[in-house]
Amino acid sequence: MKHTYAKSSIVALLAMIVCTITTLPANAHEAHVHGVGTLDVATDGAQLNLHLDTPLMNLLGFEHPANSEKDQLAAKKMAQQLRAAGNIFITTTDAECKLTSVKLESAALTPALLGEPVSAKKSITAPSEHADLNADFVFQCAHPERLKTIDVKLFSAFQGFQKINVQMVTPKKQLAATLTPSAFRISW
C-alpha cells in the first residue's frame, strides 16, 4: 500500500507541475534567459516524461515568427531533430526506453512548422517580448528499474544552449541539477 501511495503522489506532483507550467501567464514564468532552458523529468512505472521549456533563441537563433523561407526551413529542421528525441535524450541502454510521443508548441511558430497536427487555423503574431518552445517527450521503458542516467544532447544539437536547469521526480527520489555542455548527464 505504501508503494502505491508513493507512486500516486509522484503522479499527482508531476500533474501539478505540468498544470502549473502550462497555465501560468507568460510573465509569471521563470525569467526568459537566452542560453538557459529548463527540463522537468519524471518517471512513473515504465513511463519516462520529459518537459523542455526554452527560449526559441537557444534552438533557432531567433524568436520571431518564421515568415521567410530560410526561417521556415530552420524551424522544420529543429522540429525534426526534437521529434527524434531518442537521439537527444540518451537513456541507460539496459532500460530499453523507446520514444512514444512528442508534442511541440510555440506561440511564434505554426503547428505545421513544428510537425504538429493542424486542427484549427492558428494565427501567429510576433511575440511582444520573447518566444519560447515547450516540448513534451514520453518514453516507455521495458526495464524501468534499470534506468539510471539520461545523457542530454541538446548542447551538441543546438549551439544556443549554455545551461539547462533540471528538476526530476522518481518513485524513490527528487533531485535538481544544472547541466552544461561538459556536464550533460543526469544520474540518480
Image (spheres, helix red, strand yellow):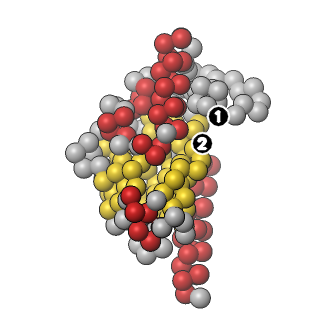
> As shown in the figure, which amino acid type bears the numbered disc 1?
Glu
Q: Quadrant of the C terminus?
A: bottom left
> In the image, is 144 to the left or to the right of 166?
right
Label 2 SS: strand
Task: Indicate whether 34 appears above or below 52.
Answer: above
Whether residue 130 is situated above or below residue 24 in the rendered picture: above
Determine whether, in the image, residue 83 is placed left or right of residue 161: right
Q: Residue at x 38, y 58 (%)?
A: 93
Residue at the bottom extreme, as displayed: 1
| Mark 1 nearby-residue class (10 Å; few <14, some 14–19, many ≥20) | some
Q: Eyeballing the image, is 144 above or below 66? A: below
The residue that label 1 is drawn on is 116
| Residue at the spot of label 2 | 103
Q: Nearer the viewer, residue 48 or 134?
A: 48
Which percent across, then down, holds residue 32? 43, 38
| Cα gap from disc 2 to disc 1, whole angstroms | 7 Å
Nearer to me, 13 or 141: 141
Observer-nearest of 164 and 100: 100
